[in-house]
Amino acid sequence: DTGTGTIVDDDNAQVSVAKSAGGDAAETGPDDGQFTLTIDALSATDTVISYTLTGAATEGSDYATIATHEATIAAKVQKSSNGLHGFR
């Protein structure tokens, strides 16, 4: 048996990252950092974004250990704010 299917939703969406207002994660802390993920096309399902943090700050000493390096933009939502906690 064979079958043929048509993909009706094959659009690629772009995700951008920006620092949220007030989410500076100042050196004098603890002070939480905040970033906002924005997707340019709404999705019918949750969009999970895996991320890597780079720079001079060290996870576990300069800021709290992050359980998972993933953030989710919920289905039919364009923006998601996410925190990095315990900057010190």
Image (cartoon, rainbow, N blue to C red):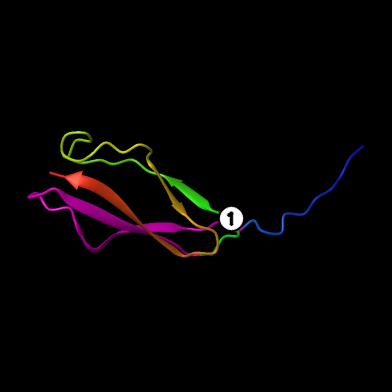
- How many residues crowd around disc 1 within 10 Å: few (fewer than 14), some, or many (20 or more)? few
Instruction: Please tell me whether residue 36 belongs to the stretch shown in magenta.
Output: yes
Residue at the (80%, 50%) spot, across then down:
5
Viewer-nearest residue: 24 or 17: 24
Horizontal relation, residue 56 to residue 82: left or right = left
Furthest residue toward right: 1
Tally the numbered discs: 1
Does residue 85 sit above or below 77 in this rendering? Answer: above
Mark 1 = which residue?
45
Element type at marker 1?
A: loop
Horizontal relation, residue 7 to residue 82: left or right = right
Residue at the (21%, 52%) spot, across then down:
32
Horizontal and vertical percent for residue 66?
Answer: 31, 38
For the stretch drawn in magenta, the main secondary structure is strand
Residue at the (17%, 53%) spot, across then down:
25
Horizontal and vertical percent for residue 26?
Answer: 12, 53
Which three-letter amino acid code belongs to the residue tagged 1?
Answer: Thr
Q: Quadrant of residue 42?
A: bottom right
What are the residue bounds of the magenta stretch? 11-40
